[in-house]
Image (cartoon, coloured by chain):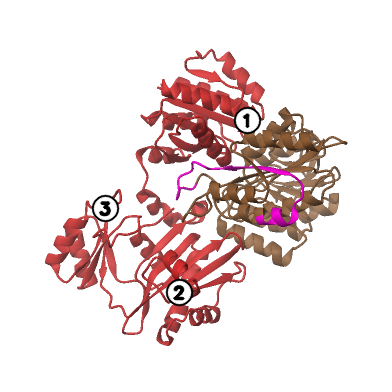
């Protein structure tokens, strides 16, 4: 779950990471109020989850109310690389003496946490990694041991952060690490981390990705879920708790297991079709889950055929079959279904489908994944 | 032979009194696995269809001599359950639980590494392991796996994806090819057992003659495996990588399956494996067909 900058800053604030005073604003009036509260000069920033906001004109400095009115009016509704700006973040403008970069992620290869720190901030870290890889200090942290202040300070020294910013940087690193680990982030990044002329160090930006698996211990995340950037199909899928990603094709996909769902997309593509979505109904999917999945697929107007690809492990064939029969009673499906059913209780499942008396124009069975993909693609093209 | 488990493996099921634990634990027993005990705190003394339940893993191990555990408990409880098994001296822990936070996985992995180096964790979020005809721990439907033949050649399977693991077993069965062991390592960011662990065991196992590997987008585990194969694996291999058409920046279901910053693409992984001499199938069926050719050349 990716957070907007303002949410990231609010999340940082929970862990005492210093950020500029500011507030979110959905209208010009709210922007003016936020600017008054933060104190001029202010920065008006578009809240979109895409890079290059500044270049697109989505970040502007304002010295007074008139300028806030102008910039807020221009930025709200602006289209930045396909993302329409609906919300602003207005914060007190900071004097910047120097800019750094800091982030924590999980290094999957090393199975440890990874700190990346650089005295070259404010630019794309990927660009720094290309042009001057030695400018980035990489430090692995054992998740069981964590990060202490002395280690954080040494990392700052190694990254050639100037003397006057060392203590402030080390302090923020320890807090950012807590935010990352206790706060269940996949990514916690500050770029730029700034040094002010007064000697204070603080986070001028916030990029936070939360681990959706940890939602159960973070009730405060509920508000982030509401603002997640989803299309209508994805929103409907979410109400049913389905693992769904909307795509542009015409073959609706339902599969059990992420790997099989991905593979189903690939196979549909190989036989000349295109998938309308990724949908993993997961392990243990029962009749209700299958019915909900079909409802979501049916909602997508581009779908011309539906390919259900089930290989039973936890998911049982008879449950899948019951779900399809039940869903056909509940939802008036526009598109025909091609199903391939194998694995746990597949025989029972096929029997249930055969006994249900569903006409072949609505539902047909194919013996293999490739056969089913070909049939579904042929139907989608008719 | 087989890797990690065999006909003598004694298994306890943590969560045997729960829905999934009971369903799959009993299926594992029906398959012929030595399921010797279940563990559910507070339910010690009860039994599930004749399998005794204990309050703790330590009690279960003391009473039965179990050396493997099948963890089938919800995400909140799974990290503690894995560590409890390790602390009780269980040497092989299979965790099927989906949805464990990545931070917990990283802590569990590094705790095992530091404090319980003799315990191997398979998973989480994996289908488990099956040595056909000998032992099945997890959620694999046993009937789709063909036991190895005494004369061979037999194939080892290692896979990051659950359902694609079944698909691979099924493809080989259709072709009459026996499987020595099939290991599902799971699709989470911090798997307890990785490709290299399994490839290394298969390379050393005299009854495994060829290896199928199923990978997917995200991370660099397949690339690391390719380096390992080049240096250490002499047995012929075929592979399939899922997610060729997956769009960048979108998590494809598995917490680990995401292409980001141009890294972790299916193409990159296929190229790395091909360079290591692995035959690449563009779908699971093709990987199975390539394996059939390999096996035909071995016999």
Query: What residue range appears in magenta?
Result: B227-251
Q: Callout 2: residue from which chain?
A: A
Looking at marks 3 and 2 on the same chain, the residue that comes earlier in the sequence is marked by 3
The mark found on residue A316 in the picture is 1
x and y percentages locating residue B159 in the rendered image: 66, 44
x and y percentages locating residue A308 in the rendered image: 53, 28
Alpha carbon distance from label 1 to label 3: 45 Å
Alpha carbon distance from label 1 to label 2: 51 Å
Q: Is residue B177 left or right of residue A181?
A: right
- The brown-coloured chain is labelled B
Q: Is residue A161 magenta?
A: no
Looking at marks 1 and 2 on the same chain, the residue that comes earlier in the sequence is marked by 2
Q: Callout 1: residue from which chain?
A: A
The mark found on residue A118 in the picture is 2
Q: Secondary structure at mark 3?
A: loop
Q: Look at the numbered discs 3 and 2 and tell me whether their residues touch, using CB distance below 8 Å.
A: no
- B88 vs B184: above or below: below
Residue A100 is at least partly visible in this image: yes
Residue bearing the label numbered 3 = A85
The residue furthest left is A66
Whether discs 3 and 2 lie on one chain: the answer is yes
Q: Secondary structure at mark 1?
A: loop
Q: Callout 3: residue from which chain?
A: A
Identify the residue shown where x is 56% and y is 66%: A113
In this rendering, which labeled residue sits more in front, label 1 or label 3? 3
In this rendering, which labeled residue sits more in front, label 3 or label 2? 2
Whether discs 1 and 3 lie on one chain: the answer is yes
């Amino acid at each position: 779950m990716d957070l907007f900058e303002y949410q990231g800053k609010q999340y940082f604030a929970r862990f005492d990471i210093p950020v500029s005073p500011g507030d979110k604003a959905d209208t010009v009036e709210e922007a003016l109020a936020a600017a008054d509260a933060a104190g001029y000069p202010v920065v008006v920033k578009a809240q979109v989850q895409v890079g290059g906001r500044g270049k697109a004109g989505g970040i502007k400095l304002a010295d007074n109310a008139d300028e806030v009115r102008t910039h807020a009016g221009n930025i709200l509704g602006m289209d930045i690389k396909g993302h329409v700006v609906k919300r602003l973040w207005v914060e007190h403008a900071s004097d910047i003496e120097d800019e750094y970069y800091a982030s924590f992620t999980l290094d999957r290869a090393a199975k440890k946490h990874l700190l990346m720190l650089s005295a070259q901030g404010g630019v794309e870290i990927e660009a720094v990694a290309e042009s001057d890889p030695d400018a980035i200090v990489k430090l692995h942290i054992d998740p069981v041991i964590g990060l202490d202040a002395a280690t954080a300070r040494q990392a700052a020294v190694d990254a050639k952060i100037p003397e006057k910013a060392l203590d402030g940087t080390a302090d923020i690193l320890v807090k950012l690490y807590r935010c990352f680990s206790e706060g269940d982030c996949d990514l916690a990044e500050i770029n730029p981390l700034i040094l002010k002329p007064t000697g204070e160090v603080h986070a001028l930006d916030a990029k936070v990705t939360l681990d959706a698996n940890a939602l159960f211990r973070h009730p405060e995340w509920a508000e982030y879920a509401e603002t997640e950037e989803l299309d209508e199909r994805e929103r409907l899928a979410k109400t049913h708790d389905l693992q769904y990603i909307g795509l542009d094709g015409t073959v609706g996909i339902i599969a059990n297991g992420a790997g099989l769902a991905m593979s189903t997309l690939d196979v549909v593509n190989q036989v000349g079709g295109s998938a309308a979505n990724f949908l993993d109904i997961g392990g243990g999917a029962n009749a209700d889950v299958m019915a909900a999945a079909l409802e979501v697929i049916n909602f997508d107007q581009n779908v011309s055929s539906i390919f259900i690809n089930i290989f039973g492990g936890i998911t049982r064939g008879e449950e899948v079959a019951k779900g399809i029969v039940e869903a056909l009673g509940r939802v008036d499906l526009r598109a025909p279904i091609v199903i391939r059913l194998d694995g746990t209780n597949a025989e029972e499942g096929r029997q249930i489908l055969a006994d249900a008396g569903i006409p072949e124009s609505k539902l047909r069975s194919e013996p293999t994944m490739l056969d089913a993909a070909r049939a579904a693609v042929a139907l989608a093209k008719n | 032979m087989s890797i990690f488990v065999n006909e003598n493996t004694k298994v306890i099921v943590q969560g045997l009194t729960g829905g999934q634990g009971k369903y799959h634990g009993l299926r594992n027993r029906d398959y012929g696995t030595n399921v010797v005990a279940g563990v559910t705190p507070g339910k010690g003394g009860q039994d599930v269809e004749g399998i005794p339940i204990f309050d703790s893993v330590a009690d279960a191990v003391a009473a039965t001599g179990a050396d493997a555990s099948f963890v089938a408990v919800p995400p909140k409880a799974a990290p503690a359950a894995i560590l409890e098994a390790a602390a009780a001296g269980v040497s092989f822990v299979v965790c099927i639980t989906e949805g464990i936070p990545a931070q917990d996985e990283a802590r569990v992995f590094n705790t095992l590494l530091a404090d319980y180096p003799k315990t191997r964790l398979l998973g989480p979020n994996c289908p488990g392991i099956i040595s056909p005809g000998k032992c099945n721990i997890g959620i694999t439907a046993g009937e789709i796996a063909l036991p190895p033949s005494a004369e061979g050649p037999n194939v080892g399977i290692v896979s990051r994806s659950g359902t694609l693991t079944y698909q691979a077993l099924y493809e080989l069965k259709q072709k009459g090819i026996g499987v020595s062991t099939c290991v599902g390592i799971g699709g989470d960011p911090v798997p307890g057992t990785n490709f290299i662990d399994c490839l290394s065991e298969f390379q050393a196992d005299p009854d495994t003659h060829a290896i199928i590997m199923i990978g997917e987008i995200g991370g660099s585990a397949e690339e690391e495996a390719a380096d390992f194969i080049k240096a250490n694996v002499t047995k012929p291999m075929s592979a399939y990588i899922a997610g060729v058409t997956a769009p960048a920046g979108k998590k494809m279901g598995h917490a680990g399956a995401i292409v980001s910053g141009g890294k972790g693409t299916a193409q990159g992984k296929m190229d790395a494996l091909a360079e290591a001499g692995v035959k690449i199938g563009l779908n699971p069926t093709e990987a199975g067909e390539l394996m059939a050719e390999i096996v035909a050349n071995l016999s």
